[in-house]
């Protein structure tokens, strides 16, 4: 797949712009400022916080509590025992630490980490979609500008043809050069049709330029059709192997499957014992009047072991539910695999057919240009009819539009092919750009809030997984 091509949009169309706006520059702008991509990055950072939150169960919780109470009144409704007074204030620090959860916390951490990794692949998927949209928007503008030029050239040629036919009809001439009223009306009909096509081309270009601004963030300048996108595979076998290994959506579904498997273990671990220690240190004394010397220290420590016995089938229901979710995730993995192969295969064929179409359309355009020039000369000598000239012009314009469309569709198919392989990423398309560190965000979330006790407690808890 070595064929290369290029289209240069006439500089005369954009006289105020000197610097060519390359596809790589447009992609860099989208990478830095596209709202969809920036929003997904924020979502990825939010999802990675689940990994930090899951690990908090391995760490102690410390709270400060202060209470004050004053009450005076009868001890009973009958006042039999005389007045009763409650008057105390206390303040204490309480610390709790789960020592062992039968793997419950460890499995929640596994699930959270897997979902964080799934979101990382979700970000890759969004990045590929944004790049696909940006590439499509870029070549949309190029195609529609080219088609607009074709429509303008067509209308100019038809204007000349109408003028020539009308003049001949008015002045007459040699029998071989005479034309009829039908020839005049036929030429005018084609001119009116060209005017409609020109208006449609202008509308299409305006829509493409607005879409470009929405995705890239700026108005399109002088654009240049790129060569083949970087990273195109040599064989479909290599492409299929890489797609199975690196397709973003397939990778995301695999991580979600890992998370649902951990969810099953999380549900099961609820049946196991949990051990927790709690310590309290504080002081207590009269609330009113306050006398600091009358306050005394209070210290308490508790070790609790909780073993569930029966809970109305709640845990068993949650286990069954987790298993069904896991089966759904397994099917989603297979669905994503099939979709990745389907997308890759169809776009591989589209690229091959597109490049063959480009070669054929190029030859057709060259032949059409020579045919139209020849027919125009022969028409001047009375050897061709008006219909012949109009037909040759129509064929040439159709060939030119086919060529522009084939070039456009081939680049779009290449983008879809690379996206299916997992290669339509900033690392491949923008090697000199500063890249967003999604993996670093996840690693930071996993380390944030680390406590010295976490290592031994997590190691003990993992034994129950």
Image (cartoon, rainbow, N blue to C red):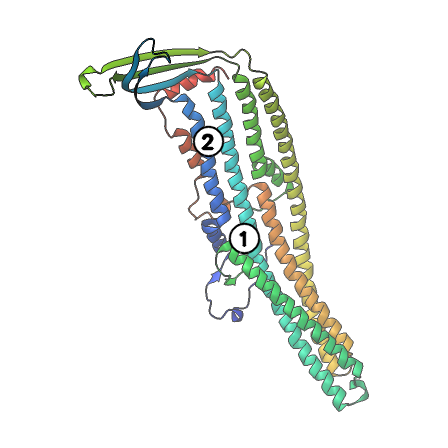
- Earlier residue among tags 2 and 1: 2
Instruction: Indicate left or right for 320 with 170 as reference.
Output: left
Q: Is residue 431 above or below residue 391?
A: above
- The local secondary structure at tag 1 comes to helix
Assess disc 1: are there few (<14), some (14-19) or many (≥20) residues with their C-alpha within 10 Å of its C-alpha: many
Judge by depth and name the residue closer to the eye, 44 or 254.
44
Q: Is residue 407 above or below residue 154?
A: above
Which residue position holds label 2?
A: 50
Q: Which residue is pictured at 53% across the width and 70% down the height?
A: 13
Front position among marks 2 and 1: 2
Instruction: Indicate left or right for 161 with 53 as reference.
Output: right
- Of all residues, the one furthest to the left in this rendering is 293
Q: Which residue is pictured at 63% across the width and 36% down the height?
A: 336
Mark 2 and mark 1 residues within 8 Å of each other at the beta carbon? no
**Residue 49 occupies quadrant:** top left
Q: Which residue is pictured at 44% across the width and 43% down the height?
A: 436
Judge by depth and name the residue closer to the eye, 196 or 104.
104
In percent of width and height, residue 96 lies at 37, 18
* Picture disc at residue 134: 1
Alpha carbon separation for disc pair 2 and 1? 32 Å
Q: Which residue is pictured at 60% across the width and 49% down the height?
A: 414
Instruction: Indicate left or right for 135 with 406 as reference.
Output: left
**Residue 79 occupies quadrant:** top left
Q: Is residue 165 visible?
A: yes
């Amino acid at each position: 797949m070595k064929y290369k091509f290029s289209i240069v949009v006439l500089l005369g169309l954009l006289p105020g712009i000197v610097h060519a706006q390359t596809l790589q520059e447009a992609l860099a702008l989208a990478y830095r400022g596209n709202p969809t991509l920036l929003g997904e990055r924020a979502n990825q950072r939010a999802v990675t916080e689940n990994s930090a939150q899951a690990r908090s169960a391995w760490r102690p919780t410390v709270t400060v509590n202060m209470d004050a109470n004053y009450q005076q009144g009868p001890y009973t409704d009958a006042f039999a025992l005389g007045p009763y007074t409650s008057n105390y204030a206390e303040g204490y620090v309480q610390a709790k630490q789960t020592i062992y959860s039968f793997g419950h916390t460890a499995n929640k951490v596994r699930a959270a980490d897997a979902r964080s990794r799934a979101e990382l692949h979700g970000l890759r998927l969004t990045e590929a979609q944004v790049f696909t949209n940006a590439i499509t928007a870029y070549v949309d503008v190029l195609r529609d500008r080219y088609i607009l030029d074709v429509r303008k050239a067509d209308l100019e040629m038809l204007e000349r043809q109408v003028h020539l036919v009308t003049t001949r009809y008015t002045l007459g001439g040699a029998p071989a050069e005479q034309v009829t009223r039908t020839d005049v009306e036929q030429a005018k009909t084609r001119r009116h049709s060209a005017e409609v096509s020109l208006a449609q081309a202008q509308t299409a270009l305006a829509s493409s330029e607005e879409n470009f601004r929405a995705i890239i963030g700026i108005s399109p300048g002088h654009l240049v059709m790129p060569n083949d996108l970087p990273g195109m595979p040599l064989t479909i076998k290599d492409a299929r192997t890489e797609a199975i290994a690196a397709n973003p959506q397939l990778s995301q579904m695999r991580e979600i499957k890992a998370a649902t498997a951990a969810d099953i273990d999380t549900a099961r671990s609820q049946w196991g014992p949990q051990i927790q220690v709690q310590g309290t240190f504080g002081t207590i004394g009269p609330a009113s009047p306050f006398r600091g010397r009358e306050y005394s220290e209070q210290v308490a420590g508790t070790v609790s072991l909780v073993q569930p016995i029966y809970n109305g089938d709640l845990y068993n229901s949650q286990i069954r539910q987790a298993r069904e979710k896991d089966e759904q995730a397994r099917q989603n993995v297979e669905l994503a695999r099939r979709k990745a192969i389907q997308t890759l295969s169809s776009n591989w064929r589209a690229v091959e057919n597109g490049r063959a179409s480009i070669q054929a359309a190029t030859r057709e355009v060259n032949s059409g240009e020579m045919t139209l020039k020849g027919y125009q000369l022969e028409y001047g000598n009375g050897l061709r009819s008006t219909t012949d000239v109009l037909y040759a012009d129509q064929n040439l314009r159709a060939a030119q539009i086919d060529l522009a469309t084939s070039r456009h569709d081939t680049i779009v198919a290449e983008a879809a092919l690379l996206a299916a392989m997992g290669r339509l990423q900033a690392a491949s398309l923008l090697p000199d750009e500063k890249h967003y560190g999604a993996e670093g965000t996840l690693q930071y979330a996993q380390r944030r809030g680390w406590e010295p006790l976490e290592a031994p407690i997590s190691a003990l808890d993992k034994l129950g997984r």
